[in-house]
């Protein structure tokens, strides 16, 4: 090779290296200058929907009690019961229970739990209650599942008539 050709190659390489060091590329200089196009990428993740199921046969059971001049029946989310003021459980005949729910969803996904309050009624009489879930937030397992319970507090004012009082409430789970 002639000496001048080798010098020309070295000069061209030096110019290219200097252009790269300053942030320019040869592809950008090859475009006409009026338009440029580059490919982008996209991604999306579909997760399993969160589904909540009430456990068959489960109930938030406040047990059997007398109301006296009023008070409360408290059932913990663990299913233990207690009374306050003049309300007392019937000896040997009162069974309290926490309600039960199961959910399925995306694996290891965080979610919140909320429950509503309500009333139980028997004829024209009613009693108000509040609910308390065993957790207000949790994470699904490696299998995408989680179970929780709900306790509550029932308030008697002392004028309730004997009878079976029933009602409903809602539990909601939401991904975070």
Image: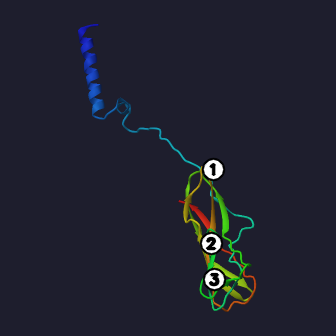
Answer above or below: position of 159 versus 11: below
Classify residue 152 as left or right of residue 35: right
Select label 2 or label 1 by which is in front: 2
User: Of circles 2 and 3, which is in front?
Assistant: 2
- Which residue position is annotated with label 3? 128
Q: Is residue 117 visible?
A: no
| Contact (Cβ within 8 Å) of mark 3 with mark 1 | no
Give the residue furthest to the front.
Answer: 92
Q: Secondary structure at mark 3?
A: strand
The residue at 58%/62% (across/down) is 174
Is label 2 in contact with label 1 (beta carbons under 8 Å)?
no
Q: Residue at x 62, y 72 (%)?
A: 151
Label drawn at residue 143: 1
Give coordinates of residue 105: x percent, y percent.
62, 55
Q: Secondary structure at mark 2?
A: strand
Q: Residues within 10 Å of mark 2 (few under 14, many from 20)?
A: many
Disc 3 packing (10 Å; few <14; some 14–19; many ≥20): some
The disc placed on residue 45 is none
Name the mark on residue 151.
Answer: 2
Residue 36 relative to residue 53: left or right: left
Secondary structure beneath dot 1 equals loop
- Mark 1 or mark 2, which is nearer the start of the sequence? 1
Q: Which residue is depicted at the point 38% across and 31% down?
A: 27
Q: Quadrant of the image for the N terminus?
A: top left
Q: CA distance from mark 2 to mark 1?
A: 26 Å
Query: Which residue is rendered at x = 59% and y = 55% of the image?
Result: 140
Left or right: where 136 falls relative to 17: right
Q: Label 1 crowding class (10 Å Cα cut-off): few <14, some 14-19, many 20+?
A: few
34 or 23, which is in the foreground?
A: 23
Which mark sits nearer the N-terminus, 2 or 3?
Answer: 3
- Residue 88, located in which quarter of the rendered image? bottom right
């Amino acid at each position: 090779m002639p000496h001048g050709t080798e010098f020309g190659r070295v000069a061209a390489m030096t110019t290219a290296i200097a252009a790269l060091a300053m942030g320019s590329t040869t592809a950008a200089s090859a475009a006409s200058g009026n338009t440029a196009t580059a490919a982008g990428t996209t991604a999306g993740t579909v997760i399993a929907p969160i589904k909540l199921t009430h456990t068959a046969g489960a109930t938030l059971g406040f047990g059997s009690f007398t109301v006296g001049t009023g008070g409360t029946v408290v059932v913990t989310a663990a299913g233990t019961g207690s009374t306050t003021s003049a309300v007392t459980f019937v000896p040997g005949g009162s069974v309290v229970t926490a309600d039960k729910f199961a959910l399925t969803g995306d694996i290891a996904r965080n979610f919140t739990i909320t429950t509503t309050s309500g009333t139980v009624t028997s004829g024209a009489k009613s009693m108000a209650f509040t609910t308390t879930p065993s957790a207000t937030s949790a994470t699904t397992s490696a299998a995408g599942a989680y179970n929780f319970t709900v306790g509550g507090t029932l308030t008697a004012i002392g004028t309730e008539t004997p009878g079976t009082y029933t009602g409903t409430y809602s539990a909601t789970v939401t991904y975070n």
